[in-house]
Amino acid sequence: MQKTSIPWQDRPDNSQDVLWRYSENPIIDRYAIPTSNSIFNSAVVPFNDGFAGVFRCDNKAVQMNIFAGFSKDGINWEINHEPIEMQAGNTQMIESDYKYDPRVVFIEDRYWITWCNGYHGPTIGIGYTFDFKEFFQCENAFLPFNRNGVLFPEKINGKFAMLSRPSDNGHTPFGDIYISYSPDMKYWGEHRCVMKTAPFEESGWQSTKIGAGPIPILTDEGWLMIYHGVINTCNGFRYAMGTALLDKNEPDKVIYRTQPYLLGPAEPYEMIGDVPNVVFPCAALHDIDDDKLAVYYGAADTVVALAFGKLSEVVQFTKDNSL
Ligand code: BMA
Protein backbone atom coordinates (compact mmCIF):
# COMPACT_ATOMS: atom_id res chain seq x y z
CA MET A 1 0.00 0.00 0.00
CA GLN A 2 1.30 3.41 -0.88
CA LYS A 3 1.62 5.62 2.14
CA THR A 4 -0.06 9.02 2.25
CA SER A 5 2.49 11.82 2.11
CA ILE A 6 2.15 14.46 4.75
CA PRO A 7 2.11 18.12 3.66
CA TRP A 8 5.62 19.41 3.11
CA GLN A 9 7.63 22.35 1.87
CA ASP A 10 11.42 22.62 2.16
CA ARG A 11 12.97 25.18 4.46
CA PRO A 12 13.38 28.48 2.59
CA ASP A 13 16.99 29.24 1.60
CA ASN A 14 17.11 32.35 3.74
CA SER A 15 15.83 30.60 6.89
CA GLN A 16 17.66 28.85 9.69
CA ASP A 17 14.51 28.27 11.71
CA VAL A 18 13.92 24.85 13.26
CA LEU A 19 10.23 25.27 12.39
CA TRP A 20 9.41 27.28 9.29
CA ARG A 21 6.03 28.47 8.07
CA TYR A 22 4.17 27.26 5.01
CA SER A 23 4.45 29.96 2.34
CA GLU A 24 0.69 29.88 1.63
CA ASN A 25 -0.40 30.37 5.26
CA PRO A 26 -3.02 30.57 6.54
CA ILE A 27 -4.42 27.33 5.11
CA ILE A 28 -7.94 27.80 6.48
CA ASP A 29 -9.68 31.15 6.29
CA ARG A 30 -11.91 32.45 9.07
CA TYR A 31 -14.95 32.37 6.78
CA ALA A 32 -14.28 28.91 5.30
CA ILE A 33 -17.80 27.74 6.18
CA PRO A 34 -20.90 29.95 5.87
CA THR A 35 -21.56 30.33 9.61
CA SER A 36 -18.00 30.82 10.86
CA ASN A 37 -16.51 33.87 12.52
CA SER A 38 -13.20 32.08 12.94
CA ILE A 39 -11.63 28.64 12.46
CA PHE A 40 -8.52 27.91 14.51
CA ASN A 41 -7.01 25.56 17.17
CA SER A 42 -7.93 22.42 15.18
CA ALA A 43 -6.72 18.84 14.86
CA VAL A 44 -5.96 16.53 11.93
CA VAL A 45 -5.01 12.86 11.47
CA PRO A 46 -4.25 10.51 8.57
CA PHE A 47 -7.53 8.91 7.47
CA ASN A 48 -8.22 6.48 4.58
CA ASP A 49 -6.12 7.69 1.64
CA GLY A 50 -5.97 11.27 2.95
CA PHE A 51 -6.71 13.11 6.14
CA ALA A 52 -9.59 13.90 8.46
CA GLY A 53 -9.84 16.60 11.04
CA VAL A 54 -11.87 18.10 13.84
CA PHE A 55 -12.06 21.85 13.55
CA ARG A 56 -12.90 24.52 16.05
CA CYS A 57 -15.32 26.84 14.29
CA ASP A 58 -16.76 29.70 16.31
CA ASN A 59 -19.93 30.97 14.65
CA LYS A 60 -20.99 34.56 14.17
CA ALA A 61 -22.85 34.48 17.48
CA VAL A 62 -19.42 33.43 18.80
CA GLN A 63 -20.60 30.04 19.99
CA MET A 64 -17.77 27.53 20.08
CA ASN A 65 -18.23 24.11 18.49
CA ILE A 66 -16.32 21.36 16.67
CA PHE A 67 -16.83 20.30 13.05
CA ALA A 68 -15.48 17.35 11.05
CA GLY A 69 -13.50 17.97 7.88
CA PHE A 70 -11.70 16.01 5.17
CA SER A 71 -8.70 16.57 2.92
CA LYS A 72 -6.74 14.70 0.27
CA ASP A 73 -3.49 16.59 0.84
CA GLY A 74 -3.72 17.95 4.41
CA ILE A 75 -3.72 21.52 3.10
CA ASN A 76 -7.01 22.00 1.24
CA TRP A 77 -9.89 21.15 3.54
CA GLU A 78 -13.63 20.60 3.14
CA ILE A 79 -15.19 21.31 6.51
CA ASN A 80 -18.76 20.17 7.20
CA HIS A 81 -21.22 23.01 7.57
CA GLU A 82 -22.94 21.39 10.55
CA PRO A 83 -21.21 20.74 13.88
CA ILE A 84 -20.45 17.23 15.09
CA GLU A 85 -23.47 15.63 16.74
CA MET A 86 -22.61 13.29 19.54
CA GLN A 87 -24.40 10.13 20.64
CA ALA A 88 -23.95 8.57 24.06
CA GLY A 89 -20.64 6.65 24.28
CA ASN A 90 -19.56 5.01 27.53
CA THR A 91 -22.14 6.89 29.64
CA GLN A 92 -25.47 8.71 29.30
CA MET A 93 -25.35 11.92 27.28
CA ILE A 94 -23.77 14.65 29.33
CA GLU A 95 -24.13 18.39 28.92
CA SER A 96 -21.91 20.34 26.66
CA ASP A 97 -22.41 24.10 26.74
CA TYR A 98 -19.60 24.54 24.24
CA LYS A 99 -16.74 22.62 22.67
CA TYR A 100 -13.35 23.98 21.66
CA ASP A 101 -9.66 23.25 21.03
CA PRO A 102 -10.00 19.60 19.86
CA ARG A 103 -7.19 17.04 19.63
CA VAL A 104 -7.52 13.76 17.68
CA VAL A 105 -5.56 10.51 17.86
CA PHE A 106 -5.91 6.96 16.59
CA ILE A 107 -5.46 4.42 19.41
CA GLU A 108 -5.86 0.70 18.79
CA ASP A 109 -9.15 0.56 16.88
CA ARG A 110 -10.65 4.04 16.71
CA TYR A 111 -10.07 7.77 16.61
CA TRP A 112 -10.30 9.44 20.00
CA ILE A 113 -11.14 13.09 20.32
CA THR A 114 -10.55 15.28 23.33
CA TRP A 115 -11.70 18.88 23.61
CA CYS A 116 -12.43 21.56 26.11
CA ASN A 117 -16.01 20.79 27.09
CA GLY A 118 -18.35 23.28 28.74
CA TYR A 119 -19.75 21.50 31.79
CA HIS A 120 -20.31 24.10 34.51
CA GLY A 121 -17.11 25.62 33.20
CA PRO A 122 -14.38 24.19 31.00
CA THR A 123 -13.21 20.60 31.47
CA ILE A 124 -11.93 17.83 29.20
CA GLY A 125 -14.51 16.10 27.01
CA ILE A 126 -13.73 12.74 25.40
CA GLY A 127 -15.34 11.14 22.38
CA TYR A 128 -14.58 8.63 19.68
CA THR A 129 -15.39 7.86 16.08
CA PHE A 130 -14.52 5.11 13.62
CA ASP A 131 -15.42 7.01 10.45
CA PHE A 132 -15.75 10.75 11.21
CA LYS A 133 -19.47 10.42 10.49
CA GLU A 134 -20.79 9.00 13.76
CA PHE A 135 -19.37 10.35 16.99
CA PHE A 136 -19.78 9.06 20.54
CA GLN A 137 -19.34 11.17 23.64
CA CYS A 138 -17.88 9.63 26.79
CA GLU A 139 -17.48 10.76 30.37
CA ASN A 140 -15.59 13.97 30.90
CA ALA A 141 -12.09 13.10 32.06
CA PHE A 142 -11.96 15.54 34.95
CA LEU A 143 -13.92 17.91 37.16
CA PRO A 144 -13.99 21.51 36.00
CA PHE A 145 -11.80 23.43 35.50
CA ASN A 146 -9.38 22.01 33.00
CA ARG A 147 -8.15 22.61 29.43
CA ASN A 148 -5.72 21.19 26.88
CA GLY A 149 -6.44 17.48 27.32
CA VAL A 150 -4.03 15.59 25.06
CA LEU A 151 -3.96 11.78 24.80
CA PHE A 152 -0.83 9.74 24.14
CA PRO A 153 -1.09 7.64 20.95
CA GLU A 154 -0.56 4.36 22.78
CA LYS A 155 -1.10 2.93 26.22
CA ILE A 156 1.72 3.47 28.68
CA ASN A 157 2.31 0.61 31.11
CA GLY A 158 -1.08 -0.79 30.09
CA LYS A 159 -3.11 2.38 30.63
CA PHE A 160 -4.40 5.25 28.53
CA ALA A 161 -2.49 8.43 29.37
CA MET A 162 -3.57 12.05 29.06
CA LEU A 163 -1.85 15.38 29.56
CA SER A 164 -3.99 18.24 30.82
CA ARG A 165 -3.80 21.69 32.33
CA PRO A 166 -5.94 22.35 35.42
CA SER A 167 -7.23 25.90 35.23
CA ASP A 168 -9.98 28.30 36.30
CA ASN A 169 -13.22 29.48 34.73
CA GLY A 170 -11.76 32.56 33.00
CA HIS A 171 -8.70 33.59 31.04
CA THR A 172 -6.56 31.55 33.40
CA PRO A 173 -3.49 33.49 34.58
CA PHE A 174 -1.60 30.32 35.66
CA GLY A 175 -1.20 26.73 34.50
CA ASP A 176 1.10 23.72 34.51
CA ILE A 177 0.99 20.43 32.61
CA TYR A 178 -0.15 17.27 34.44
CA ILE A 179 -0.53 13.64 33.37
CA SER A 180 -3.35 11.23 34.34
CA TYR A 181 -3.94 7.55 33.59
CA SER A 182 -7.03 5.47 32.89
CA PRO A 183 -7.65 1.73 32.44
CA ASP A 184 -10.79 2.33 30.35
CA MET A 185 -11.08 5.95 29.11
CA LYS A 186 -13.70 6.55 31.77
CA TYR A 187 -12.02 6.72 35.17
CA TRP A 188 -8.91 8.86 35.40
CA GLY A 189 -6.36 8.95 38.24
CA GLU A 190 -2.70 8.72 39.21
CA HIS A 191 -2.41 12.43 38.49
CA ARG A 192 1.19 13.63 38.39
CA CYS A 193 2.76 16.97 37.62
CA VAL A 194 4.84 16.89 34.43
CA MET A 195 6.06 20.42 33.86
CA LYS A 196 5.57 23.88 35.36
CA THR A 197 5.94 27.37 33.98
CA ALA A 198 9.52 28.60 33.69
CA PRO A 199 11.04 31.37 35.80
CA PHE A 200 10.52 34.72 34.05
CA GLU A 201 14.26 35.55 34.04
CA GLU A 202 15.15 32.26 32.36
CA SER A 203 12.44 31.85 29.73
CA GLY A 204 9.88 34.63 29.80
CA TRP A 205 7.73 33.31 26.92
CA GLN A 206 6.58 30.37 29.08
CA SER A 207 6.49 32.09 32.45
CA THR A 208 2.69 32.60 32.86
CA LYS A 209 1.14 29.28 31.75
CA ILE A 210 1.87 26.28 29.57
CA GLY A 211 -0.31 23.62 27.93
CA ALA A 212 0.26 20.53 25.79
CA GLY A 213 -0.49 20.90 22.07
CA PRO A 214 -0.38 18.08 19.51
CA ILE A 215 -0.43 14.36 20.35
CA PRO A 216 3.09 13.52 21.65
CA ILE A 217 5.35 11.77 19.13
CA LEU A 218 7.50 8.81 20.16
CA THR A 219 11.17 9.32 19.14
CA ASP A 220 14.41 7.53 20.04
CA GLU A 221 14.94 10.20 22.70
CA GLY A 222 11.51 9.90 24.34
CA TRP A 223 8.12 11.53 23.76
CA LEU A 224 8.36 14.74 21.81
CA MET A 225 5.79 17.10 23.29
CA ILE A 226 5.02 20.30 21.43
CA TYR A 227 3.40 22.78 23.80
CA HIS A 228 2.32 26.37 24.07
CA GLY A 229 3.76 28.81 26.54
CA VAL A 230 2.33 32.16 27.53
CA ILE A 231 3.80 35.42 28.76
CA ASN A 232 1.61 38.12 30.29
CA THR A 233 2.48 41.47 28.76
CA CYS A 234 1.04 44.96 29.22
CA ASN A 235 -1.04 44.19 26.11
CA GLY A 236 -2.26 40.81 27.38
CA PHE A 237 -1.19 37.21 26.82
CA ARG A 238 1.26 36.22 24.06
CA TYR A 239 1.28 32.53 23.00
CA ALA A 240 4.36 30.85 21.47
CA MET A 241 5.30 27.18 20.97
CA GLY A 242 8.16 25.14 22.37
CA THR A 243 9.12 21.47 22.68
CA ALA A 244 10.04 19.04 25.42
CA LEU A 245 11.20 15.43 25.56
CA LEU A 246 9.50 13.21 28.14
CA ASP A 247 10.71 9.82 29.34
CA LYS A 248 9.32 7.00 27.19
CA ASN A 249 8.08 4.84 30.08
CA GLU A 250 7.58 7.51 32.73
CA PRO A 251 6.32 10.52 30.80
CA ASP A 252 5.94 12.62 33.93
CA LYS A 253 9.74 12.90 33.79
CA VAL A 254 10.93 15.79 31.61
CA ILE A 255 14.33 15.07 30.06
CA TYR A 256 14.75 18.25 27.98
CA ARG A 257 12.69 21.37 27.45
CA THR A 258 13.44 24.33 25.23
CA GLN A 259 14.51 27.63 26.73
CA PRO A 260 13.80 29.59 23.50
CA TYR A 261 10.49 29.16 21.71
CA LEU A 262 10.52 27.45 18.30
CA LEU A 263 7.79 29.57 16.76
CA GLY A 264 6.20 32.73 18.12
CA PRO A 265 3.72 35.25 16.69
CA ALA A 266 5.57 37.24 14.03
CA GLU A 267 3.55 37.12 10.79
CA PRO A 268 0.54 39.43 10.32
CA TYR A 269 -1.97 36.55 10.54
CA GLU A 270 -0.45 35.56 13.91
CA MET A 271 -0.36 39.11 15.25
CA ILE A 272 -3.66 40.44 13.93
CA GLY A 273 -7.00 38.75 14.53
CA ASP A 274 -9.66 38.28 17.15
CA VAL A 275 -6.96 37.62 19.75
CA PRO A 276 -3.63 39.10 18.64
CA ASN A 277 -0.27 37.38 19.20
CA VAL A 278 -1.36 33.76 19.46
CA VAL A 279 0.20 30.66 17.92
CA PHE A 280 -1.60 27.66 19.39
CA PRO A 281 -0.54 24.19 18.13
CA CYS A 282 -3.17 21.42 18.38
CA ALA A 283 -1.96 18.78 15.91
CA ALA A 284 1.10 17.47 14.10
CA LEU A 285 1.56 14.98 11.28
CA HIS A 286 4.88 13.22 11.14
CA ASP A 287 6.79 10.79 9.00
CA ILE A 288 9.62 9.11 10.90
CA ASP A 289 11.18 7.55 7.75
CA ASP A 290 11.25 10.83 5.83
CA ASP A 291 12.17 12.82 8.98
CA LYS A 292 9.28 15.23 8.47
CA LEU A 293 7.00 17.10 10.84
CA ALA A 294 4.02 19.31 9.96
CA VAL A 295 2.52 21.30 12.83
CA TYR A 296 -1.02 22.71 12.61
CA TYR A 297 -1.66 25.75 14.75
CA GLY A 298 -4.33 28.32 15.36
CA ALA A 299 -3.16 31.85 14.57
CA ALA A 300 -4.56 34.88 16.43
CA ASP A 301 -7.67 32.82 17.37
CA THR A 302 -8.85 33.41 13.79
CA VAL A 303 -7.29 31.05 11.19
CA VAL A 304 -5.38 27.76 10.88
CA ALA A 305 -1.72 27.80 9.79
CA LEU A 306 0.95 25.20 9.11
CA ALA A 307 4.66 24.96 9.96
CA PHE A 308 7.25 22.37 8.97
CA GLY A 309 10.35 20.94 10.54
CA LYS A 310 12.74 18.01 10.40
CA LEU A 311 11.92 15.70 13.30
CA SER A 312 15.59 14.94 14.03
CA GLU A 313 16.44 18.66 14.06
CA VAL A 314 13.57 19.46 16.41
CA VAL A 315 14.75 16.72 18.78
CA GLN A 316 18.36 17.93 18.55
CA PHE A 317 17.32 21.54 19.10
CA THR A 318 15.34 20.50 22.18
CA LYS A 319 18.42 18.76 23.59
CA ASP A 320 20.84 21.56 22.71
CA ASN A 321 18.70 24.41 24.00
CA SER A 322 17.24 22.93 27.15
CA LEU A 323 16.39 24.87 30.29
C1 BMA B 1 -6.95 29.97 25.71
C2 BMA B 1 -7.98 29.17 24.94
C3 BMA B 1 -7.56 29.05 23.50
C4 BMA B 1 -7.16 30.38 22.91
C5 BMA B 1 -6.19 31.11 23.80
C6 BMA B 1 -5.84 32.47 23.31
O1 BMA B 1 -7.36 30.19 27.03
O2 BMA B 1 -9.22 29.84 25.01
O3 BMA B 1 -8.64 28.54 22.77
O4 BMA B 1 -6.53 30.18 21.65
O5 BMA B 1 -6.73 31.21 25.09
O6 BMA B 1 -6.96 33.31 23.29
Image (cartoon, helix red, strand yellow):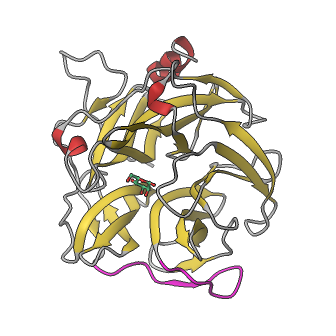
Location of ligand 1 given as a quarter of the image: bottom left
The x, y position of residue 61, in whole percent, is 27, 78
Residue found farthest to the front: 234
Q: Is 4 in front, or is 33?
A: 33
Main SS of the magenta part reads loop
Question: Can residue 5 be seen at all in this image of the molecule?
Answer: no
Q: Quadrant of residue 47?
A: bottom left
Q: Which residue is drawn at 19% across and 58% down?
A: 29
The x, y position of residue 249, in whole percent, is 78, 35
Question: Can residue 99 be seen at all in this image of the molecule?
Answer: yes
Q: Residue at x 25, y 57 (%)?
A: 274
Q: Is 121 in front, or is 279?
A: 121
Total labels drawn: 0
Image quarter of the C terminus: top right
Q: Quadrant of residue 265?
A: top left
Residue 205 shown in magenta: no
Vertical comparison of 131 with 250: above or below: below
Residue 87 shown in magenta: yes
Q: Which residue is drawn at 35% across and 30% down?
A: 263
The x, y position of residue 310, in whole percent, is 40, 25
**From the viewer's perspective, is 166 left or right of 265?**
right
The x, y position of residue 258, in whole percent, is 52, 22
Vertical comparison of 25 with 207: above or below: below
Q: In which quarter of the image is residue 83?
A: bottom left
Residues drawn in magenta: 81-97
